[in-house]
Image (tube, rainbow, N blue to C red):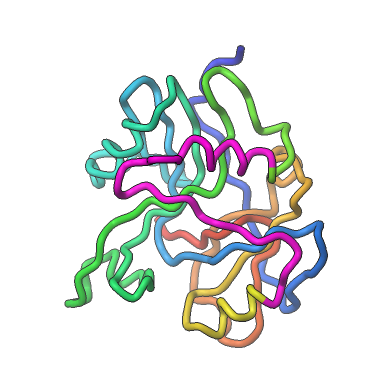
Amino acid sequence: MTPLPRWIAPQLCRLVTKIPAGDAWAHEIKFDGFRLHARILGSQASLLTRNRLDWTEKYPQIASALGALKCRQAYLDGELCAVQKDGATPFSALQGHRETPANLAYFAFDLLHLDGNDLSGLPLLERKAGLKTLLKDAPTGVRLSEHIVGNGACSRRHRNSGLKGSSQSRSHRHAARNAERRGPARGPLPRRPTGAEGRGGAKGRE
């Protein structure tokens, strides 16, 4: 048993111009929102930015939904987005600058700690399997960021569909080994073929 970490430095990604292929890679949609960690202890959840700011009071409904997950304690990595009816997650909607209605949702893409167990040393796909189990029957507002293994063509379709882009992570990597290769980067992605090698989906702003 290991204590629940108060803070885990987020893994950062880098932009690439060629989408990797093969079963060594997992591909995810890149949402356009805020990169947030969720630290859950009992029924209380804290929302932490990549710069270690506490944004729990900014989004109490999301914190409440995460606190209702069926666990004693957990540490999740994910992206807070404003989801429109068409499924798009424009950052402007999250800021409230659009007239189009949107609902807030926290897309979780990694599980680093669960009920006294440090999962960061496990391969990515094992952590994602645990995350999927944890989020089964999750409250409204908490969603799983789905992934595809070894199919870069799907990532190209995501890019061409008007979404922000896609991100690729080595499916066998441990979280600690990915520490400098995953996560948010400021500014828009180039419009032509790009991917974010390293994480699974978040270019956040804080």
Q: Write the residue at 39% across / 22% down.
A: 41
Picture quadrant of residue 29: bottom right
Q: Is residue 145 magenta?
A: yes
Front in this rendered view, residue 172 or 95? 172
Residue under the image location 56 percent in, 28 percent down: 113
Asked if residue 179 is positioned above or below residue 103 in the image, the reply reads above
Quadrant in the picture for the C terminus: bottom left
Residue 156 on image: x %, y %: 64, 79
In this view, the residue farthest toward the left is 99
Q: Which of 43 and 15 is in front in this view?
A: 43
Q: Quadrant of the N terminus?
A: top right
Residue 120 spot, x, y in % from top left: 66, 33
The magenta segment is 126-153
Residue located 35% across and 37% down the image:
66
In the orientation shown, which residue stands out farthest toward the top?
A: 1
The answer to whether 156 appears left or right of 97 in the picture is right
For residue 198, what is the image quadrant? bottom right
The picture places residue 155, in percent across and down from the top left corner, at: 63, 73
In this picture, residue 191 sits left or right of residue 40 = right
Q: Which residue is drawn at 72% across and 78% down?
A: 17
Count of marks overlaid on the render: 0
Residue 50 horizontal/vertical position (percent): 48, 47
With respect to residue 94, does 128 lie above or below?
Answer: above
Question: Is 69 rendered above or below residue 138?
Answer: above
Q: Any magenta on residue 64? A: no
